[in-house]
Image (cartoon, rainbow, N blue to C red):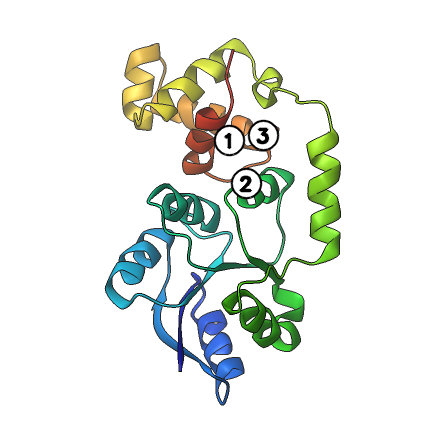
Amino acid sequence: MIPILVADDHGFIRAGVEAVLRGTPFQVVATAASGEEALAAIEQHNPAVVLLDINMPGLNGVAALEALREKGDERPVVLLTAEITDRQLMAVMRAGVQGIVSKDGAESELVQVLERVHAGEKAIAPAFLQRALDLSLKPVVNPFAKLNARERDITRLVAKGMRNREIGQQLNIGEGTVKVYLHAIYQKLNIENRTELALMVVNDEIG
């Protein structure tokens, strides 16, 4: 029996993975609905392979993978994704992801991918590898160049861990106005939440 941890914020996906793995050498020993829960469950259950949904509330799959690697944990991680942004793809490749499985083809591909990563191989589709190569050859563009001065100020404060009310007090604007600015920032940077925004600031200079 090869122990697997499955982290996905949708219960039916977790149940679906367990159903696909039934009768295989892989057994789900723990499940999680967020990156934070996944990291705690990894400590507790010590799975041989970790299966992470890339987009979860709070700490997403990318951040959870990076947190694992920062601790020196090199166990195989497979990302389960419906879609992956360029930024997410480059981040997980840098963090040494072992496998990427599209949710569309998960039923037929998952067991084979898990077998390969458990054997020490990489299981990343050629299309993802080519996309990552193309992106790595592109000139580096500062994503924050899209933001105006006020949006960059708000981004810096988000990166410091400040909440909307605190940001509003700091900049002398209403909490509702901060939310409007954040929505615009997320759209310009093609991200979904403040966690992703804070991670971007770690990786890029705002200017």
Quarter location, residue 67: top left
Residue that badge 3 annotates: 189
- Furthest residue toward front: 120
Which residue occupies 48% across, 46% down?
A: 62
Q: Nearer the viewer, mark 2 or mark 3?
A: 2
Name which residue type carries label 2. Answer: Arg
Which residue occupies 59% across, 69% down?
A: 113
Distance from disc 2 to disc 3, alpha carbons, whole Å, reads 20 Å
- Left/right of residue 204 with respect to residue 179 in the rendered view: right
Residue 77: image x %, image y %? Answer: 48, 58
Q: Are marks 2 and 3 in contact (CB under 8 Å)?
A: no
- Mark 1 or mark 3: whose residue is earlier in sequence: 1
Residue 198: image x %, image y %? Answer: 42, 30
Residue that badge 1 annotates: 183
Above or below: residue 177 compared with residue 90: above
Quarter location, residue 189: top right
- Mark 2 or mark 3: whose residue is earlier in sequence: 2
- The residue nearer to you, when weighing 147 against 203, is 203
Quarter location, residue 138: top right
Distance from disc 2 to disc 1, alpha carbons, whole Å, reads 28 Å
Above or below: residue 23 compared with residue 153: below
- Left/right of residue 63 with respect to residue 87 in the rendered view: left
Callout 1 secondary element: helix
Which residue occupies 40% across, 82% down?
A: 1
Distance from disc 1 to disc 3, alpha carbons, whole Å, reads 10 Å
Residue 39: image x %, image y %? Answer: 32, 54
Above or below: residue 120 compared with residue 130: below
Q: Residues within 10 Å of mark 1 (few under 14, many from 20)?
A: some
Callout 3 secondary element: helix
- Mark 2 or mark 1: whose residue is earlier in sequence: 2
Which numbered dot is residue 94?
2
